Image (cartoon, grey):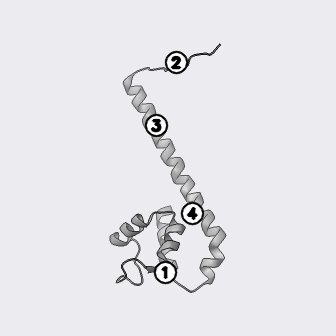
Amino acid sequence: MKSKKKKIFICQEMDEMLKQRVDYLVKISLINQRKRWITDYIEKNFAKFMGEDRLLTSKEVVEMLQISSQTLGRRIKQGELVPINPEAKRNYRFKRSDVFQLIEKKGE
């Protein structure tokens, strides 16, 4: 014999409040998970990135910050990240120190 699940509805205000609370908790969880991913990525690749003197490519910065290429483009336009070769249209290069400063600033 199957039991039928009943949908409990208290009131519209309570329903909306619960939905907002769940959305808020999901967002917090995603933010914390992204921070863990970034720190794990830095831990795994710390020697690689700090041991080399070469500049970072756009692709490496996107992977390191766990952002999309469009978000990288917005951060360049906003002045948060300044490429070494601003005249380039796609193949930007970045200093490691600038990327790490951005990570530290976002972590605060």
Mark 1 or mark 2: whose residue is earlier in sequence:
2
Label 1: how many Cα within 10 Å (few below 14, some 14–19, many 20+): some
Closer to the camera: disc 3 or disc 4? 4
Q: CA distance from mark 1 to mark 4?
A: 18 Å
Q: Secondary structure at mark 1?
A: loop
Q: Amino acid at mark 1?
A: Lys
Q: Amino acid at mark 4?
A: Ile
**Count of picture labels:** 4
Mark 2 or mark 3: whose residue is earlier in sequence:
2
Q: CA distance from mark 2 to mark 4?
A: 42 Å
Residue 87, horizontal then vertical, whole percent: 34, 84
Name the residue located 55 percent from the left edge and 58 percent from the top edge.
Answer: 35
Mark drawn on residue 1: none
Mark 4 highlights which residue? 38
Q: Secondary structure at mark 4?
A: helix
Mark 3 highlights which residue? 21
Label 2: how many Cα within 10 Å (few below 14, some 14–19, many 20+): few
Mark drawn on residue 6: 2
